[in-house]
Amino acid sequence: MQLAYRAADGAIQGGLQRRGFDVRMTHSAVLANIDIATGTRATVLAERAAVSKQAIGELIDDLQNRGYVRRVQDPADGRAKLIQLTRTGHKLMDAAYEAIGEIETTLLTETGEKDLETARNVLRALIGISETPE
């Protein structure tokens, strides 16, 4: 599973780099967990990514320096900040979905529709297991 995750993440990153975006695999801790429409608090991003608040803060700083995210006041709590995508960040996410589409097309070509759907079902089951409380 870990090898498949790394391969998929690497393929997405490669697709983004080919499209002119300057990102690293570690940025996915933020990008894969951000609420695209509204933004997300850093503490929530850290929880979702299962990393420390310090680690997520460093990734946010890096993404902000690259122009992909910004910090804004949380309208629900003036003391808190939301991490939001910038216009460039939204373009980055669009490009990521395009790269994911290319991966799916390649998998469909290599495995066929039935095997790809079986793989999707297995992954959905795995996600369901990880979301089940202990």
Image (tube, grey):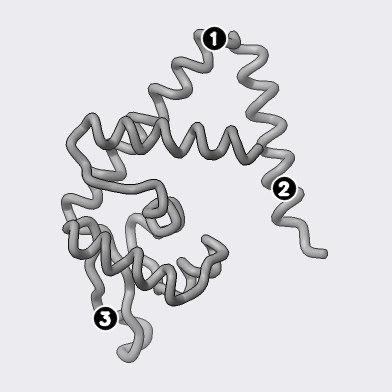
- Which residue appears farthest toward the right when viewing the image? 134
Task: Provide residue 104's location: percent of width, then percent of height.
Answer: 47, 22
Question: Which label is found at residue 98?
Answer: none
Query: Which residue is under mark 2?
Result: 128
Query: Label 1's element?
Result: helix
Q: Residue at x 43, y 76 (%)?
A: 54
Quarter holding residue 126? top right
**Looking at the figure, which quarter contains the N terminus?**
top right
Q: Residue at x 35, y 85 (%)?
A: 80
Residue 133, compared with residue 91, is above or below; it is below
Q: CA distance from mark 1 to mark 2?
A: 26 Å
Q: Residues within 10 Å of mark 1 (few under 14, many from 20)?
A: few
Q: CA distance from mark 2 to mark 3?
A: 34 Å
Front position in the image: 129 or 77: 129
Q: Residue at x 18, y 63 (%)?
A: 65
Task: Provide residue 46's location: percent of width, then percent of height.
Answer: 49, 69
Task: Provide residue 79's location: percent of width, then percent of height.
Answer: 33, 91
Q: Residue at x 24, y 49 (%)?
A: 90
Instruction: Give yes or no for contact between labels 2 and 3 (Cβ–Cβ under 8 Å).
Output: no
Query: Which residue is under mark 1?
Result: 110
Query: Label 3's element?
Result: strand
Query: Label 2's element?
Result: helix
Three-letter code for the amino acid on which mark 2 is drawn: Gly
Front position in the image: 105 or 19: 19
Q: Residues within 10 Å of mark 3 (few under 14, many from 20)?
A: few
Three-letter code for the amino acid on which mark 3 is drawn: Gln
Question: Which label is found at residue 73?
Answer: 3
